[in-house]
Image: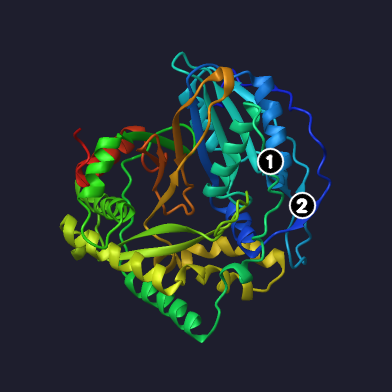
Amino acid sequence: MYASAVGLRSIPPGHSRPVPRTLPATPLDEAFLDLRAVSVLSVHLEIRVAGHVDTARLATALARAADAHPMARARPAPEPPWALRARWVLDAPLAVEVSDDVTVARDELQSRLPDDRAVAVVVARDPDGDVIAFRFHHAAIDGRGALRFVASVVDAYAGRRLPDAGLGRARDLRRLAGARGVRDVAARAGKIASDAWGRAALTRVAGDGGADGPHHAFVTRRLEPGVVAALRGSRPSGATLNDLLLAAHLRTVVAWNARQGARVGRSVSVMMPVDLRGDDESVANLASYVAVVVPTRDLADAASAVAAVAAQTRAVKEQGTAGWIVDVLSVLVAPRGVKRVMPRLLPLVEGRFVETTILSNLGPAALGDLAEAGRVREVRFSPPNLSPRMAVTLGVVGHDDGLTLTWRSLRRDIGPAGLEVVARMFLETLGADRG
């Protein structure tokens, strides 16, 4: 059995002005709050610095960043089962834990959601430079929000001025991404129906027997700038670098299952987060999701796989179908007690409505130095496994003109050794295993 990481010790939080406020949860927030019943919804983001972190100074920086971004202090308010809306209380404490083992700290932090606080932080001491590992609860803060918050923590640590972002302007989801008319409704309904049809006989990532330990396992690989530039240069006309990554991820699922002697269905699907913010800098949960569902026959070679993926991602951009989740959740009116049990019904419908995997690409992380702790040498990110049927996810973040890729698995299905194989197969499939 796994025991909690030893050597963790708490650092008192820094002083900050209190935020005695409550805030209505959005329908998107509620959906993630209710998924707690079946998944550990941790957004994983960490940075490695060149030197060593002063934990008291970091605790003060956290408090300053939370003043600028109040959702960092969010925790769910108690709610009766007959309530129609969930609410956030914006008064959760922020503190820093310390560990002497980077791997244990990462795995254990991301595998637990002890009290539903929006943010938890561990500093892992390491001779090659300390690691600051953040765990964000996805119901409160998504990947892009997590990156914005970490940037504010870095700036606060270094004594730089922070934006007065407050709670942002983007919590009215229907205004932000709701259907604007019949054409939008038709396009979104068509996308939902097409995806459901395409998921017939969907491929699930096969397990390898798993391993004992924390709920999640992690493996990271770095694509250096020269490799990234070569990949950009190899893109077919009309395809993006993200399309190449999505296609390689889908093809890796097929290759992994074949290696395991496991079933490969008629299709493979990947869930792709889409940011709803526009130019808003909100630290909040504002990610919609679209499915890319590809027939297995189209994944036989790289060219056909990229073409199939690019056609779908291009249509999503042109037709604006990423807002479908806002439309669906906004009309779903039911007492909170009813909504809380709905995720437990997923096994009845997940064959048609739960993707094979996730690939989330945060884009470039522009982070300054941390004063005496030095520059940020590395950034890692991974999205949560949103369903017990989603054995593997992949997170991508840019830094110093390269890309860092982090695979996350449900350890009971695929352990660290198997995840290493998945990463190697992906790089071979992408053509990025050399250079």
Give the farthest residue toward the front.
Answer: 161
**Rendered location of residue 207, percent (x, y):** 33, 45
Query: Label 1 is placed on what type of residue?
Result: Asp
Q: Which residue is mark 2?
A: 77
Please tell me which residue is depicted at 29% across the width and 39% down the height of the picture.
423
Q: Which residue is mark 1?
A: 115
Identify the mark at residue 321; answer none if there is no mark.
Answer: none
Q: Is residue 201 left or right of residue 345?
A: left
Give the farthest residue toward the bottom.
Answer: 182
Query: Label 2 is placed on what type of residue?
Result: Ala
Describe the element under mark 2 as helix, strand or loop.
loop
From mark 2 to mark 1, how far is it between C-alphas? 12 Å
Describe the element under mark 1 as helix, strand or loop.
loop
The colour scheme applied to this rendered structure is: rainbow
Q: Nearer the viewer, residue 317 or 411?
A: 317
In this view of the protein, can residue 421 be seen by the observer? no
How would you rate the neighbour count of disc 1 (Cα within 10 Å): few for under 14, some for 14-19, many for 20 or more?
few
Q: Nearer the viewer, residue 88 or 390?
A: 88
Mark before the other along the chain sequence, 2 or 1: 2
Q: Is residue 84 left or right of residue 151?
A: right
Q: Quadrant of the C terminus?
A: top left
**Rendered location of residue 348, percent (x, y):** 47, 67
